[in-house]
Amino acid sequence: MIPSPVVWADPARASAFDSWLAAMAGPHRLQADSVRLASADASFRRYLRVDRADGAGSYIIMDAPPAQEDCKPFIKVAGLMQDAGLNAPRVLSWDEPLGFMLLTDLGTQTMLDVIAPPQAADAIASPTAAHHALYMDAVDALVRWQLASRPDMLPPYDDALLSRELALFPEWYVARHRGLALDTGLQDKLDGLFAQIKASNLQSLGGARVYVHRDFMPRNLMVKDVAPTLVASRTALPPEGAELARGGPSLRSMTPHADVAALAESRLGVLDFQDAVYGPITYDIASLMRDAFLSWDEDFVLDVTVRYWQKARQAGLPVGDDFGEFYRAVEWMGLQRHLKVLGIFARLTLRDGKPKYLADTPRFIKYARNTAARYRQLGPLMVLLDEIEGNETRVGYTF
């Protein structure tokens, strides 16, 4: 099949790309006429794929206009991930003034593709043994990443950054998307709730800090080619993590069939890491299990989170000795992320003309409301969310 041509809005940038590609083709053995779009993200970056002339696979080209995108963080974090032993893209060439970068290609199949979640934002995915194996691979990669952490290597995830992120919710979701006036009363309520959330996130687990990917989720994790029979497997999972979290028996060993075991030995590729920071150890596991594009039932979320916590403890990471305390910290960290993402998705729609993201906001409202409903201190937030969404509040705190 002949690749579709790449569309360039700016003729001057198209000309610059052609010149750059011609210079790269010889040294890196590129088939210049095979360039096609690989993916685009929520920023000004996009990714192209180009085949090798010798037929030995392909490479990825990052197109990141320098006026809108600073690629230095990408270069730095890619190096940190390589040092940590993660399967991240290697930078083969970078033209900083033009904003073109040649990278190794981690493939075309994301973990999200393999899971094939239901499309509805309110749908709950059904976990299989194959899904469980993928999540264990993700947990292993996360622990490896966190073990490599060193202070002063990445920007701090501090009060100032948390405040900027939380401010996106009232500005873009509440005021601009929902059209509600941010009067003094509403702003005061939000400020008080945000102060509690920030305090929990910065102080929980003794203020433990590690490298934080910030979007560690199936959409950004690449999987080697998987047999269709494995993807279609519907083997039920025992709710082992849920039992441990509720004070039940220890985790039992799970012995998946041979195909799943082989899949678990593969190493997931990691993408979209350029915004990494040094911050709370709870962030990435919260991101992994409260996904932007698929939802799991609570038993599966607990099971994977317990297994992460066990592996992290065994590796010497500062996750504490009490899983209940750790899970509370994960939920409060996740709440901050949910509110931030609601603001970001509204901004992507209203400012950047990307309406597809707003379709997933009901998922995040549900995540945020469910967390608020479990903690008495967050009761006012639950009421506020119901007011914003026009729902009736039902109270039933767990803690």
Image (spheres, rainbow, N blue to C red):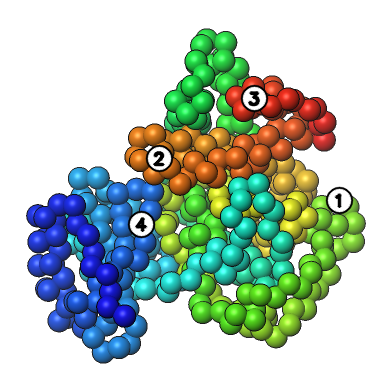
Gap in Å between the C-alphas at discs 4 and 1? 42 Å
Gap in Å between the C-alphas at discs 3 and 4? 34 Å
**Tag 1: amino acid:** Arg
Which is in the foreground here, disc 2 or disc 1? 2
- Of the image marks 4 and 1, the number of the one nearer the N terminus: 4
Which residue extends farthest right? 248
Per the image, the residue denoted by label 3 is: 390
Say which mark, if any, is on residue 246: 1
Q: Position of residue 114 (x, y in %)?
A: 57, 69
- Of the image marks 2 and 1, the number of the one nearer the N terminus: 1
Gap in Å between the C-alphas at discs 3 and 1? 34 Å
Per the image, the residue denoted by label 2 is: 348
Q: Position of residue 190 (x, y in %)?
A: 57, 21
Which is in the foreground here, disc 3 or disc 4? 3
**Tag 2: amino acid:** Leu
Residue 398 visible to an observer of this rendering: yes
Per the image, the residue denoted by label 4 is: 40
Up-down: is 392 above or below 8?
A: above
- Of the image marks 3 and 2, the number of the one nearer the N terminus: 2
Gap in Å between the C-alphas at discs 2 and 1? 39 Å
Quick check: 323 left or right of 114? right
